[in-house]
Amino acid sequence: MTPAISVVLADDHTLVREMLHDRLRREGMEIAGVASAGDEAVRLAATTHPDVVILDIDMPGISAFEAARLVRAASPATRIVFLSAYVHDGYIDQALVVEASGYLTKSEPPDAIVEAIRKVHRGETSFSPAVLARLVVDSAGIRLGSAVQTRYELLTEREREILGYVARGLLQKQIARQAGISVKTVQHHITHTMDKLEIHDRVELARFAIREGLIEA
């Protein structure tokens, strides 16, 4: 008998969690755990080693993309699927950077989410049509189409993470704690980020982050 697909669900919306939990169980999947924040999802993945983790992009605590990196480090065989109400180039690009197997919009019907989980469990990828329309898929892999590439792509993975924290209004000491680095290193990343983006104040930085989907307006 084929083992059930094990899934960790991470979403801070109770109704979404409960809906997915009930539907996936009816489909014969095993719910290894549910979480309402990224750090909870990481702990669950590290202890249960699920086949798939569903990560809502907009949750409290550490960013969903940092959570994905930590999940992959703790459980390399686990597949990551992001779930979001938004289709932003910044989100999509970060999902590709952390090698997510899927990116689904919350407008997708439950059937599509179930099928996406099955696909990524088989080693395939699954993207909502609105996301797929912004991607180029070829022998070189999956990437954002050149028509939608932005200055954001000039930033390193760490600079993108720090930018997200800055744009959400965190102080440098808070960012240092979240990222596990020194305040001096945070300052270094902020300086380099603003230089690369040719941005000179935090208001403009926040506007840029909103355009790229790092935070909501």
Image (cartoon, grey):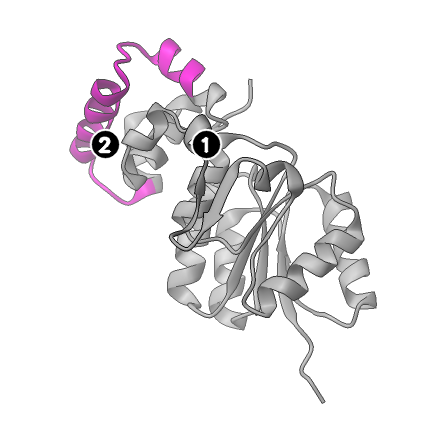
The answer to which quarter of the image holds residue 209 is top left
Residue 64 visible (yes or no): no
Residue shown at 48%/51% (left/top)?
39
* Residue located 67% across and 82% down the image: 3
Q: CA distance from mark 1 to mark 2?
A: 21 Å
Residue 28 image-quadrant placement:
bottom right
> 39 or 154: which is nearer to us?
154
How far across and down, in percent of the image, does residue 154 sit? 28, 30
Task: Read off the residue under disc 2.
Answer: 186
Say which element carries label 1: helix
Q: Earlier in the sequence, mark 1 or mark 2?
A: 1
Q: Residue furthest front?
A: 139
Residue 90: numbered disc: 1
Queried whether the magenta region covers residue 209, the answer comes back as no
- Is residue 125 positioned above or below 166 on the image? below
Q: Which mark's residue is nearer the viewer, 1 or 2?
A: 1
Which residue is more in the foreground, 146 or 10? 146
The magenta region covers 179-208
Asked whether residue 202 is drawn in magenta, I would say yes
Q: Main secondary structure of the magenta part?
A: helix
The kind of residue on which mark 2 rests is Val
Residue that appears at 51% across and 71% down: 49
Dot 1 alpha-carbon crowd within 10 angstroms: few under 14, some 14 to 19, many 20 or more? many
Farthest residue in the bottom direction?
1
